Amino acid sequence: AQTVTQSQPEMSVQEAETVTLSCTYDTSESDYYLFWYKQPPSRQMILVIRQEAYKQQNATENRFSVNFQKAAKSFSLKISDSQLGDAAMYFCAYRSPWGTSGSRLTFGEGTQLTVNP
Amino acid sequence: GAVVSQHPSRVICKSGTSVKIECRSLDFQATTMFWYRQFPKQSLMLMATSNEGSKATYEQGVEKDKFLINHASLTLSTLTVTSAHPEDSSFYICSATSGVQETQYFGPGTRLLVL
């Protein structure tokens, strides 16, 4: 079974600075998807970024980018120019592409990000 | 991105009563919907996976008779908590996807409080 580990329960960053959230995963599959979701105080889960394992290029979405290291099974999220609205719980998630449970997400424990003004 | 709604957003009920939570995909057909439970400051715990027109697949430890899931159409899934008790109080979140290769989109969640 796949597992996802986020070793940083809490992180903080100054507004306008850069912060990196860590995520590692364990899988025997060669093809899969990785996600970062954000959950602000409203508790609405919001997709931040998605990475397909077969793509070598790291995904980017505006101020959000990932460092995907397939061999190391590492998938970190970098937030540049942090804004107060980035404060949230961030979840790393893994998804296998195959089978009847192919859409199923395995979540990490989450990292609570605080942005200081 | 795609929109998923949940209703109600908050519900308070007495112990022993049943509560139904609806999850709708508003602008796409959801072949698969998922139901999660989340306790404060914890991650999401998958309860069950439902595919349109078939029985839901429950995770180990989730009582099928207590958490009834129906996915009767491509845009609607319901979770009914039967004979609710205070320990069922939690935040319930649904998500939907239009296919195995597609992203899961989440509803805003339902806060259930059982007195």
Image (tube, rainbow, N blue to C red):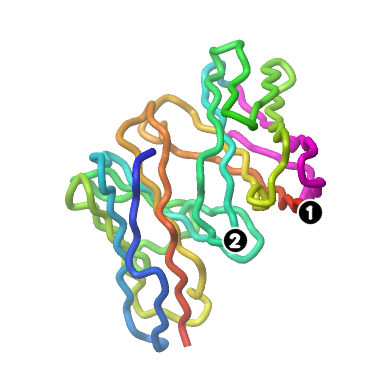
Alpha carbon separation for disc pair 1 and 2: 18 Å
Q: Is residue A111 left or right of residue A11?
A: left
Could you say where residue B11 lies in the image, as x and y percent from the top left? 40, 77
Q: Image height check: is B36 above or below A33?
A: below
Q: Would you name the residue on which mark 2 appears?
A: A41
User: Is label 1 on the same chain as label 2?
Assistant: yes
In-front residue for pair A44/A32: A44
Chain for disc number 1: A
Give the residue type at disc 2: Pro
Q: Image height check: is B10 above or below B4?
A: below
Which range is magenta? A1-28
* Badge 2 density bin: few <14, some 14–19, many ≥20, Cα 10 Å: few
Say if mark 1 contacts mark 2, CB within 8 Å: no
Q: Is residue A5 magenta?
A: yes
Which quarter of the rendered picture does the N terminus of chain A lie within?
top right
Q: Image height check: is A11 above or below A50?
A: below
Give the residue type at disc 1: Pro
